[in-house]
Amino acid sequence: MSGEFRFSFGPWNIHEGADPFGPAVRDSIEFGKKLKMYRQLGFEGVQFHDDDAVPGMDGLSGEQIIKKAKEVHSILESEGLVAEFVAPRLWEDARTIDGAYTSNDPACREYARQRTHRTLDIANALDTKLVVLWLAREGTYLREAKDSKVAVDRIVEAINDMLAYNPEIKIAIEAKPNEPMDHTYIPTTGHAIALGLLCDDPSRIGANIESAHAILAGLDPSDEMGFALAHKKLFSVHLNDQNGLKFDEDRTFGAVDLRRAFNQTRILDQYDYGRGGEFVGLDVKAMRTQKLEVSTKHLSNSRTIFLRLVELARTLDKNKVEELIGQRDYEELDMLIINHLMGK
Ligand code: 3MF
Ligand code: MG
């Protein structure tokens, strides 16, 4: 069964445990060592920020960046790994303080454009056609600080520029309603897909749905997935879990709400997610309390939970479900699902 899904995560998912209120609590694991862990943990796809692949890229020439990215590609090959996607990290540089593509400062917008071109060069060197856009700071702390109509126009312009720069890439927008911003311009999957329709080639724009981001928007992640699947726009997922409306917790998939996780695996499995080459991506963080030697359990546990839930989705008595739907006996359907999740 496990052979039917390919799993991925990003190197940032093995991390030092710093949070906004305290420093790192675990030693850093160097990038090459992290790559060695992928296969051992049951993963074959690597998700990249551009500077995960080429650290310090803003200080390097275009050629130097491509050379470094090609070196990383060779390491991936020797480890039996593939790059799933590359994402421009447009939220740390001083020029992205007020947003990147939506910054009010034209010089900052130009930085974002140039940086994104380098991201696409890196994707090309790593041999992936997928680019993820988490539009981290494309929003406001203050409603009056930006014009929301102009902001959307500017994001469209930036995406069109990407589509033209490399006619082969596809873009998966990772919607998130808040954090670090008060409000973002592309908070949900519906916004992401609608934004794609404004772009020059909507067929190349889709979504990367993160469970926690949907929950932060007050939505059910499996319904967000259903919406994207109906539009044939589910290019990737960032599975994790989230305990209510607070900071983005990136908990182990299924650890907070098993039933909500069950419904995500159920819809993915039902509509053959993965058959077009899509990865089951995770975006999970180890708790800060976790010691270094055991700081990758959140990854292997998320994968195990996903596979067990797929098994439960497949063994659910579908005839019984249909019968109860026919009778409109949703109380009994509720009990059927709960019994099934409890192994009864
Ligand atoms: C933020 C996120 C990001 C994105 C990543 C890839 C750091 O809430 O989920 O993780 O997933 O930047 O685009
Ligand atoms: Mg994510």
Image (cartoon, rainbow, N blue to C red):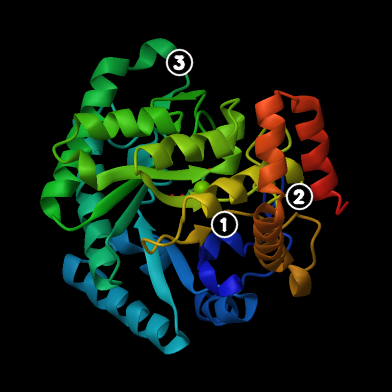
Q: Nearer the viewer, residue 137 or 27?
A: 137
Which quarter of the figure is the N terminus placed in?
A: bottom right
Q: Quadrant of residue 218?
A: top right
Q: What residue is drawn where x is 76% and y is 49%?
A: 255
Q: Where is 26 relative to 155, above or below?
A: below
Q: Residue 255: which disc?
A: 2
Q: Label 1 is placed on what type of residue?
A: Leu
Could you tell me the amino acid type at mark 3? Answer: Leu
Task: State the residue at coordinates (72%, 32%).
Answer: 324
Q: Please name whichever residue, 74 or 225, is drawn nearer the observer in this view of the structure.
A: 225
Residue 46, given in percent of the width and then of the height, sits at 46, 68
| First-in-chain label (2 vs 3) | 3
Measured Cα–Cα span from mark 1 to mark 2: 13 Å
Identify which residue is drawn at 58% across, 42% down. 211
Packing grade of label 3 (10 A; few <14, some 14-19, many >=20) is few
Horizontal and vertical percent position of residue 32: 50, 80
Q: Is residue 214 left or right of residue 331?
A: left
Query: Disc 1 marks which residue?
Result: 282
Quickly name the residue at label 3. Answer: 142
Q: Secondary structure at mark 3?
A: loop
Q: In this rendering, is residue 336 above or below 46?
A: above
| Circle 2 residues within 10 Å: few <14, some 14–19, many ≥20 | some
Q: Is mark 1 within 8 Å of ligand 2?
A: no
